[in-house]
Image (cartoon, helix red, strand yellow):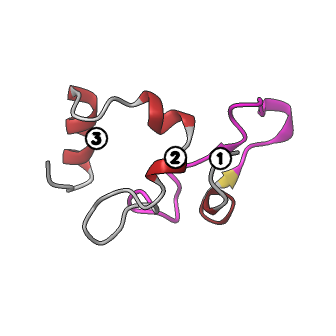
Amino acid sequence: MREPAIRQEARALPEYIQTEDKAYQLFPLPFHSGCPYLKEDELCRIYESRPSVCRRFEAGSEQCIEARRRQGIGA
């Protein structure tokens, strides 16, 4: 795991479905209304050590813009 804060904010997956790359459910979680790693300025506070799922999510892509729109986050 790259980022220690993930252990505090995420939910561990059951061991039988964990892989080397996937051990935690990051989002959506019932106790979070948005990404817990965004700062007040809506920038990622763990960008340098962000998880693989975030690294594969291309910034500025249609998928990114739609996800940000659904969360009420500016462009």
Give SS at disc 2.
loop
Given residues 13 and 51, the one toward you in this image is: 51
Q: Residue at x 44, y 51 (%)?
A: 47
Q: Residue at x 48, y 56 (%)?
A: 46
- Give the mark, 3 or 2, whose residue is nearer the N terminus: 2
Give SS at disc 1.
loop
Q: Amino acid at mark 2?
A: Arg
What stretch of residues is rendered in magenta?
12-35
| Whether residue 34 is situated above or below residue 63 in the rendered picture | below
- Residue under label 2, please give it: 50
Q: Nearer the viewer, mark 3 or mark 2?
A: 2
Q: Is residue 26 magenta?
A: yes
Residue 27 visible? The answer is no
Are the residues at dot 2 and dot 1 in contact (C-beta closer than 8 Å)? Answer: yes
Give how far across and how far down residue 43 sits, in percent: 31, 58
Name the mark on residue 67. 3
- Give the mark, 1 or 3, whose residue is nearer the N terminus: 1
Work out how far the residue at label 2 is from the one at label 1, CA to CA, in angstroms: 7 Å
Q: Residues within 10 Å of mark 2 (few under 14, many from 20)?
A: some
